[in-house]
Amino acid sequence: MSDLPEGYRKWQSDVIVDLLQAYDVEYIAINPGASFRGLHDSLVNYGGDNPKMLVCQHEETAVQIAHGYAKATGTPMACILHDLVGLLHGQMAIYYAFADRAPVFILGATGPMDESKRRPRSDWHHTAQSQGDAVRNFTKFDYQPHAIEGVPDSFMRAWSAMVTEPAGPVYLCYDAMLQETPLETEVFVPGPEIEKAPAPMAADPEKLEAIVRKLLYAQSPWIMAEFTGRHPGNFDKLVRLAETLGVAVWDVNSSLCFPNRHPQTLSMDTDSLKSADAILALDVVDWEKATAKLNSTTRELTSYLADECIWMEVGFHETGIGSWSLDYGRYLPKSLSALGDPRLAMPQMVEIAERLIAEDDTLPARIAARKTKIAARHDEIFARWADEAKTDRDASPVTPARLAEEVWSVIRDEDWVLAAGTLRQWTRKLWDFDAPHRHPGKGLGTSTQIGIGLGVALAHKKSDKVVVTFQPDGDLMYDAGALWTAAKHEIPLLMVMYNNRAYYNDWHHQIRMARLRGTDEDKAHIGMDLFGPEPDFAAMAKSMGVWSEGPIERPEDIAAAVKRGLEVVKSGKPALIDVICRHR
């Protein structure tokens, strides 16, 4: 605690600070609001700015920073949203955290619920009967305690629910008068002896053995992994499992699950999927996008898989499914399914496989032959991608492949982290993701990447790691004020703009419609472009206190600018380099 005045009288909001400290919450992102003024004072004066508050210009950014921090560390970060209006501002970011299974601890405030204590107009407009209703469909738990005795109980329950897989955001709402009332009674605060969450859930061992048998005796077995990389040690566990079984691996990239340069990686190789006869989905939600060709104009799907290919699953799908959002996708038709945590299942499957291999002396040669074939295909596709990257290499505006090459040439010898976007997969095709911390997972929708990038950089702020993000121009336009937060709190993030002066994803959809209907393709940009005038992102960043350069249009000028930006980031401050890029 900080130095408190003599005879300090404890307030009920101080208990919330006690709980945050008991759970080792390091940071708390906020956009200021009067509804939590009691908690705010407690954080500053009673708690000694521990957790440390980060000031954000928009509630979405506050949630996104906590989202990125959780993706990078596996540890929850907190944010506070001001009463009803702040919660409504933050809704979109909360939904993305829910869809991305990120444990974000959201605190809020309301009221006073006692009508006699409400200020005219503002307290009435900003108060809801049940504020959690606004986010109940896309949070794991919400609660609004009516008395201080309910604060520790709901806090502990929310935390445990949040981090238990499938993880996700939770929301706790505190009455303004509850916060501002003196503490008149002793309130339980959990100590280090209290278990904060249950141990991971184990899968049925008999079902795991059946899955392992199918993979060992298949002709062309695969593992598809999506969220397994979120937990420490799982990256290496999956490597050992894949090598033991002799299977190809497709990393869906919601977290970095497997090294992209490992000889058994066949991620993004849809041609090879045609020979698959057995696939294990390991904590996967988005299985269909990887395994089917989509005609984006007609919405027709064509599977890459043979009809006889069987699916198996280990994960949490049935426990994570809801009925409001359709983020769970199409149902996976499984031949074998085990509900359980891959943290426990992968080592179990290795033990089962080693035993079965020892019992059948034909299996080692079978596995070795598969691994040789997979490695040859791996080398072939990476060589092809290297050749494809040379197409229009010297063009201006810059191609995404050339931008990926130039940044890689500067950071490859650093202990680097890629925060979010993958430059239309070119980083995955050209860089070497050799360690689990290299990438916390692919980017999400527009208006998410600047905040998530800052959260990832905040997670590594006290380390020697260099965090880089490819920042889309349209995304930054949603909240350019996030640049001020980066400067204010000295968040060392190297932001390289992927500036194609457009909301091009939607532009491309309009091109498809024009081609389908025979209308004018040259008009497809209307309502989609970011030119006339072109935003000056370097000037915008400078105005917020962020070092910047650009716009850069010649590819040969990129590396030198990135080197200068890298030195700024290594000094502990953010940097932005604006690069003008091709649409695709």
Image (spheres, rainbow, N blue to C red):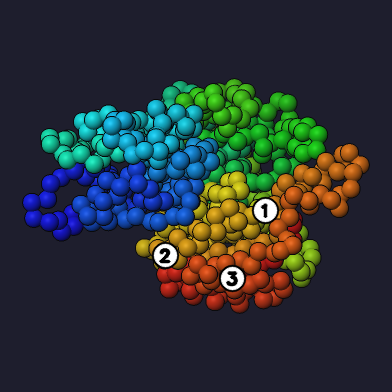
Residue 335 visible from this viewpoint: yes
Residue drawn at 89 percent across, 39 percent down: 517
Q: Which comes sooner in the sequence, label 3 or label 2?
A: 2
How far apart are the alpha carbons under marks 1 and 3? 26 Å
**In the image, is 203 to the left or to the right of 224?**
left
- At which x and y percent is residue 583? 74, 57
The residue indicated by pointer 1 is 424
Query: Mark 3, residues whose alpha carbon is within 10 Å: few (<14), some, or many (≥20)?
Result: some
Q: Secondary structure at mark 1?
A: loop
Which labelled disc corresponds to residue 488?
Answer: 2
How far apart are the alpha carbons under marks 3 and 2? 17 Å
Dot 2 amino acid type:
Lys
**In the image, is 117 to the left or to the right of 212?**
left
Which labelled disc corresponds to residue 539?
Answer: 3
* Residues at marks 2 and 1 touching, judged by CB atoms closer than 8 Å: no
* Quarter containing the C terminus: bottom right
Q: Which residue is at the front of the view, 275 or 116? A: 116
- At which x and y percent is residue 338? 49, 25
Q: Secondary structure at mark 3?
A: helix
Q: Secondary structure at mark 2?
A: helix
Q: Which comes sooner in the sequence, label 2 or label 1?
A: 1
Residue drawn at 32 percent across, 36 percent down: 118
- At which x and y percent is residue 547? 52, 72
